[in-house]
Image (tube, grey):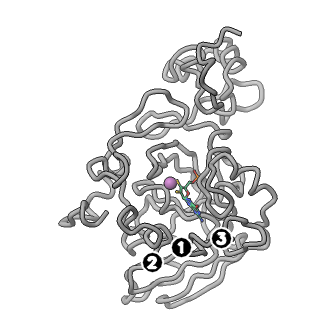
């Protein structure tokens, strides 16, 4: 075989239409050309990227508001950080297969006028589902573009009516060591927990997600419900949530407990503030060969920078 990458094992997510044939931008344009796009779809391993197409009609690649193509469903569901299952990103999908997600309840409590426990089906029927195509920037300096389905966290919080004392929101992942072998590790303070300041939680960009690419979200991505905060490092986007608590104290977080000098409470994506062990100035977009420059607030600065007016973001990392 005449494989130029012979000496290097190639993972499927590193093979993109660009490597195979021509650029993804040309690919998007070509999607309008029936014969061309069908031929290309046939020779690209990322054919799952073709979405929204009625049967027999060539699909259109989903893009975020910067024009960046969404990652394939295959990449999104096979390269995951989910330490409850494994610290190996490629092992999470097989290990989380069959994880029990029904029945499932989310308890919303603490400093609220109307505490309530929701069944997952209540959440799906109470709040209209939207699609949000967001970049997810992992603190480990890789990123993906993911078409989420979900609803704003604000719509849920408004329903339970936070009291005037509430300043923060604390989130907790399910604790189920029988099904999640990683929770047997003594090196982490389980269950996973995370937190947001109340104004961050109420921001319209902050969503709870129950789906990806219009399909029910899979266990590896945080089924049946997970947080997505697109201007923060991925670890803030806590998976498989069972508890949401309004509080007046800054919540402890799993990663800050493990390594406080590396993982702060804010965790805003910031190319100027490096991780103590590596640079945050650039990132590897899964599916691309050359690195990209990391954008301040992951490219959502226009919407969120004012939340941090007057704060020294190198101190409040
Ligand atoms: N409960 C829980 N939530 C979690 C994690 C985890 O290990 N456990 N990993 C976080 C990290 S580091 C990232 S980058 C994202 C990855 O989300 P994805 O696998 O859906 O892309 O989930 C976050 N949420
Ligand atoms: Mo991450």
Q: Looking at the image, is mark 2 or mark 3 nearer the viewer?
A: 2
Q: Quadrant of residue 295?
A: top left
Instruction: Kindly report the distance in space between the C-alpha atoms of the residues bearing marks 3 and 1.
Output: 21 Å
Q: Where does the image place residue 73, in percent across and percent down from the top left?
A: 66, 40
Q: CA distance from mark 2 to mark 3?
A: 26 Å
Q: Earlier in the sequence, mark 2 or mark 1?
A: 1
Q: Which residue lies at the image location 51% right of the left edge and 36% below the top edge?
A: 63
User: How would you rate the neighbour count of disc 1 (Cα within 10 Å): few for under 14, some for 14-19, many for 20 or more?
Assistant: many
Residue tagged by mark 3? 123
> On the picture, is 161 further left or further right than 260?
right
* Secondary structure beneath label 3: helix
Residue under circle 2?
Answer: 252
> Left of 33 or right of it: where is 290?
left
Residue sitting farthest toward the top: 2
Is the C-beta separation of discs 2 and 1 under 8 Å? yes
* Residue at the (52%, 82%) spot, across then down: 245
Mark 2 falls on what kind of element?
loop
Name the residue located 48 percent from the left edge and 22 percent from the top edge.
25
Q: In the picture, which quadrant includes the C terminus? A: bottom left
Residue at label 1? 193
């Amino acid at each position: 075989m005449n494989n130029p990458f012979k000496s290097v094992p190639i993972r499927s997510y590193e093979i993109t239409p660009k490597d195979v044939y021509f650029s993804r931008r040309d690919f998007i344009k070509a999607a309008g050309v029936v014969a061309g796009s069908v031929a290309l779809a046939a020779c690209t391993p990322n054919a799952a990227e073709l979405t929204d197409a009625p049967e027999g009609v060539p699909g259109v690649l989903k893009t975020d508001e910067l024009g960046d193509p969404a990652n394939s469903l295959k990449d999104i569901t096979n390269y995951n950080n989910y330490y409850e299952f494994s610290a190996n990103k490629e092992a999470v999908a097989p290990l989380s297969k069959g994880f029990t997600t029904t029945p499932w309840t989310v308890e919303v409590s603490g400093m609220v006028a109307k505490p309530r426990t929701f069944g997952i089906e209540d959440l799906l029927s109470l709040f209209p589902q939207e699609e949000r195509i967001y970049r997810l920037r992992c603190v480990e300096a890789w990123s993906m573009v993911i078409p989420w389905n979900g609803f704003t966290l604000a719509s849920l919080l408004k329903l339970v009516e936070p009291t005037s004392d509430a300043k923060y929101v604390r989130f907790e992942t399910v604790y189920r060591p029988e099904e999640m072998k990683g929770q047997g590790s003594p090196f982490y303070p389980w269950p996973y927990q995370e937190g947001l300041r109340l104004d961050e939680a109420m921001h319209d960009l902050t969503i709870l997600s129950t789906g990806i690419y219009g399909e029910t979200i899979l266990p590896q991505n945080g089924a049946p419900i997970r947080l997505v905060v697109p201007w923060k490092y991925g670890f803030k986007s806590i998976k498989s949530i069972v508890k949401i608590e309004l509080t007046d104290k800054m919540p402890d977080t799993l990663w800050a407990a493990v390594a406080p000098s590396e993982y702060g409470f804010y965790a805003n994506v910031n190319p100027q503030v490096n991780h103590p062990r590596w640079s945050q100035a650039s990132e590897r977009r899964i599916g691309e060969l050359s690195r990209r420059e990391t954008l301040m607030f992951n490219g959502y600065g226009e919407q969120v920078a004012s939340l941090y007016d007057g704060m020294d973001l190198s101190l409040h990392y």
